[in-house]
Amino acid sequence: AHDVLFPGAGVLAFRFPLTYLEYATRTPFQAGPFRVTAMPVAHSTAIPCFGLRIGSGGTVVAFSGDTEWTDALVDLAADADVFVCECFGFDSAPPHHLDYATLGRHRAELSCRRILLTHMGEAMLERAAELGLDTASDGLRLVVGHPA
C-alpha cells in the first residue's frame, strides 16, 4: 500500500519498527502499553473510517479522526481525559467533516473532561482564540492524565 500511494518510496528503509495490527470494531486490543478501541465514524462512504480510544494507566485519549457528526462520537469520547476532535468549519464544513456549531449542539452529550479541536480550516483558525475550547497547534504539548 505504501508503494502504491507513494510510488518509489517502497525502497526507502523505515527508521523505526513497523507493525500492522488488525482490529475489529469496538473490540479492545493491546498495542504495546496501550489499550485501543476502534469505533466507526462517518467520513467516507467508500471505505470504513474509525475514531480511536487509547488508554494507558487509567488515562484515556479519544481521537475522532475525520468525521461528520455521528452518535458514535458519544461513545468514543465517553469519560475520556481528552477528546481530540476534528472541527474543520465554524458554522459549516465540507461533507464528512464537523463544524463548531454542530459540535456545540451536541456538547452536552460528550462526557469527556476536555476537548482539543484539531484539523481546523480558515474560519476556525480565525476564531480560535474566542472559542472557549482548546485548539491544537504545531508543537503543542498537552499534559493528560490524573494527578498523582
Image (tube, rainbow, N blue to C red):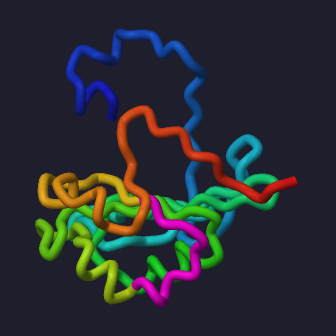
Q: Is residue 105 above or below residue 73?
A: below
Q: Residue at x 23, y 32 (%)?
A: 5
Direction from residue 35 to residue 65 in the image, left or right? left
Residue 98: percent from left, percent from top: 26, 70
Q: Residue 71 placed where, x, y %?
A: 41, 86
Q: Quadrant of residue 70?
A: bottom left
Q: Residue furthest front?
A: 130
Q: Is residue 50 visible?
A: no
Q: Of 20 and 126, which appears nearest the observer? A: 126
The correct choice, above or below, for 136 with respect to 116 in the image is above
Q: Can you tell which quarter of the image residue 87 is in?
A: bottom left
Residue at screen point 31% across, 73% down:
42
Query: Is 114 contained in the magenta span?
Result: yes
Verify whether residue 72 appears in magenta.
no
**Which quadrant holds the N terminus?**
top left
User: Which sits in the foreground, 48 or 134?
Assistant: 134
Residue 121 position within the rendered picture, expressed as x and y whole percent measured from the top left: 17, 54
Magenta segment boundaries in residue numbering: 107-116
Residue under the point 60% across and 58% down: 61
